[in-house]
Image (cartoon, rainbow, N blue to C red):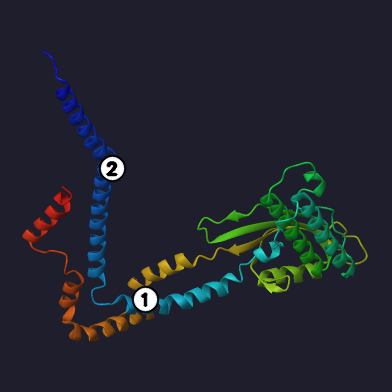
Amino acid sequence: MKVSKEYIMALSALIAVLGAVGGGYQFYYRERLDEYQKNIQDEKTFEEKLIALDSAFSTCPPEDLIKAVNGEVNPMVEELHRRAAFYQVLDLREIQPIPEDKMLGFYYREEFDRLYAEFRQQALASYPTCYYPDTTFGAPRPDEFTGMEISKEEVEAALRKVTFGLEMMRLLMQSKAAYITDVQLWSPRLTPNKLFTDYVVGLSFAMMPKDLVAFLDKLRVGEVLGQQRYASVIALSIQNKYLRWPMEPPVEVQMLVTFVQANVDETALVEGAEVAMAASTDGSKANAEEALKAWRGRLGKAGGEEGVRAGRFKDIPTTKWGKFKRWMRKNFWPF
């Protein structure tokens, strides 16, 4: 059978149209259908959440509830910051921002030398004179960075170590240490509840017994470097190697001290306060009850609780026929 030219052209046109329709469905319309089905599922989830919220807070408007919650949260946030100031270590490790136009190796050498020069001047001016070790507290010396490619984070971490270690030696000098043998810095450790970060410091020094008692008493009450801050002695060793001296000798002390940094998280506090407010029986409940009373006073003008619910969810069908029409419109309208 001979196939005419017109037949071939018509068949080709039909194939081209079918290919265009199939390609449009596959690469355009199908993606839109998937997106539409996802939007339908999101709408269903949002409606369920909205209905649940309306059922839980049907007698209390959001603005009154927010005011009631803030009445409890704001004082708690203020108290959180007040207490967090006692659990403070970052100021002892604070460094100056690194300029953008500085080469990191040269900047580290300059800051390293500056920090030690300031400390030496203070050590010479202190009384009584205190011997201190030539240590970098685990930080690399500037020569160790020569010829190496270093990052900004490495420079900041090293300078913080040096700054914190020098502050610990200042603390011993202010406490009248006879000499300092060593200062070791442990790596920071996050507590299991993630509320605090522990900074453990190992101190080895010699001090007169009466000065040691005064030093331990200051740590007990939190008087550290002229500021109230938490400090806990977790290990202590005292040796007196000069019992036969005719005068009172200094004792050699080795101790581990923990300083604590509070990790302030206002978001967690607000969430916890909202949960506590819903279940508490103290003043927070009274605030919530006042908010409920204020809302109940408005119900008479708005047609009562049912009127508020009906007005808020007037588009949500409640009958079987309404639900069926809504389902048909959602699932078959695109076709």
Q: Which label number is shown at residue 28?
A: 2
Foreground pick, 136 / 254: 136
- The amino acid type of the residue labelled 2 equals Tyr
Residue at (74, 53) in percent of width and height: 184
Q: In the image, is 279 to the left or to the right of 105?
A: left
Q: Quadrant of the N terminus?
A: top left
Of the numbered discs 1 and 2, the one sitting upstream in the chain is 2
Q: Quadrant of residue 307?
A: bottom left
- Say what secondary structure mark 1 lies in: helix
Q: Residue furthest left?
A: 321
Q: Position of residue 270 (x, y in %)?
A: 43, 69
Foreground pick, 283 / 28: 28
Residue at (83, 57) in percent of width and height: 113
Q: Residue furthest right?
A: 246
Please state which of the two labelled residues, at mark 1 or mark 2, is closer to the viewer: 2
Residue at (26, 82) in percent of width and height: 295
Q: Judge the density around disc 2: few (<14), some (14-19), many (≥20) Cα neighbours within 10 Å.
A: few
Q: Residue furthest top?
A: 1
Q: How many marks?
A: 2
Q: Position of residue 210 (x, y in %)?
A: 80, 70
Using the rendered image of the protein, determine whether residue 282 is visible from the camera's viewpoint: no
In this figure, which residue is indicated by the disc labeled 1?
A: 66
Using the rendered image of the protein, determine whether residue 82 is visible from the camera's viewpoint: yes
Residue at (80, 69) in percent of width and height: 174
Q: Is residue 334 above or below residue 276?
A: above
Q: Position of residue 48 (x, y in %)?
A: 23, 60
- Between marks 1 and 2, how big is the CA–CA gap? 45 Å
The reply to whether the C-beta atoms of the residues labelled 1 and 2 are less than 8 Å apart is no
Q: Quadrant of residue 148?
A: top right
